[in-house]
Amino acid sequence: MVFWVFGYGSLVWNPGFDYDEKMIGFIKDYRRVFDLACIDHRGTPESPARTCTLEEKEGAICWGTAYCVRGGPEKEKLAMQYLERRECEYDRKTLVTFFKEGDSQHPALTDVIVFTSTPDKVNNKYYLGPAPLEDMARQIATAYGPCGNNRDYLFLLEKAMYEIGHEDDLVIELANEVRKALGVGKVLPNVGAAQLPHPPHVSIPSRQLQPLPEPIAMDG
């Protein structure tokens, strides 16, 4: 057995598992959105972070990295167990077709696994839904969890997409709005976004966020 998994968030720069091959490319009819709560890595149940998930949109493309795991059932099992723990807020595994740059007509890979979420606040307790850009930026600027702060997640994603040569307009716009909230200037193209100074304690008035029920314990 061999499986491929597509990363479009933190997996782009930090896969965290043993893989055998990776490809830069894109999937069709999906776009990256920051509509999912994270309560165990970059946020808490009382103050959830906003992390990215995928939204279906005809004609859109989402760039990222596909990773291959091969080498026997045990290795594949360990990789998938790790991914399922790490991506515990995502309630679906979707199979997608993956394309490489320069050939949008002929798939490079089929049946690639991608972790996605149900866009329904009733049936998916981690789904936050869309919000005005300023509100999302305020939430990202202030959220913090066991693995670090929410803003670094966003800045590292911005940097990773720049480094693979496929920047995401929403990521850039949201990152710059977070910088505005933090009082930090825009990043220059030759300066990594994650290298910008981030004040450890920033006082920003924000709306009270509703805690999410029943947090799932996780090792990540």
Image (tube, grey):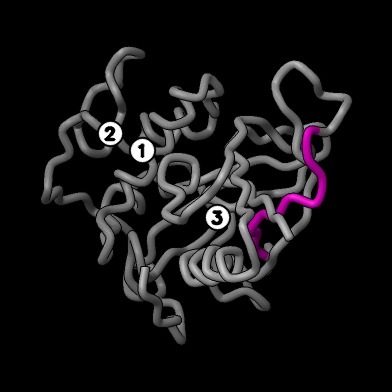
| Residue 88, visible in the rendered structure | no
Question: Percent x, y for residue 163?
Answer: 44, 23
Q: Specify whether residue 181 is painted magenta.
A: no
Above or below: residue 159 compared with residue 203: above
Q: Residues within 10 Å of mark 3 (few under 14, many from 20)?
A: many
Determine the secondary structure under disc 3. strand
Q: Principal SS element in the magenta part? A: strand
Q: Mark 2 points at which residue?
A: 194
Question: Percent x, y for residue 96?
Answer: 78, 48
Disc 2 vs disc 1: Cβ atoms closer than 8 Å? Answer: yes
Kindly report which numbered mark, 3 or 1, lies closer to the viewer in this rendering: 1
Residue 98 located left or right of residue 24? right
Quadrant of the rendered image containing residue 71? bottom right
Residue lying furthest bottom in this view? 214
Q: Counting residues from the N terminus, which is met first, the one under dot 2 or under dot 3?
A: 3
Q: Counting residues from the N terminus, which is met first, the one under dot 3 or under dot 1?
A: 3
| Residue 176, visible in the rendered structure | yes
Residue type at numbered disc 2:
Ala
Above or below: residue 45 compared with residue 8: below
Magenta segment boundaries in residue numbering: 108-117
Q: Mark 3 points at which residue?
A: 35
Above or below: residue 146 compared with residue 17: below
Q: What residue lies at 43% left-to-right and 81% top-to-bottom?
A: 215
Residue type at numbered disc 3:
Asp
Q: Name the residue under label 1.
A: 156
Query: Toward the viewer: 157 or 126?
Result: 157
- Kindly report the distance in space between the C-alpha atoms of the residues bearing marks 2 and 1: 5 Å
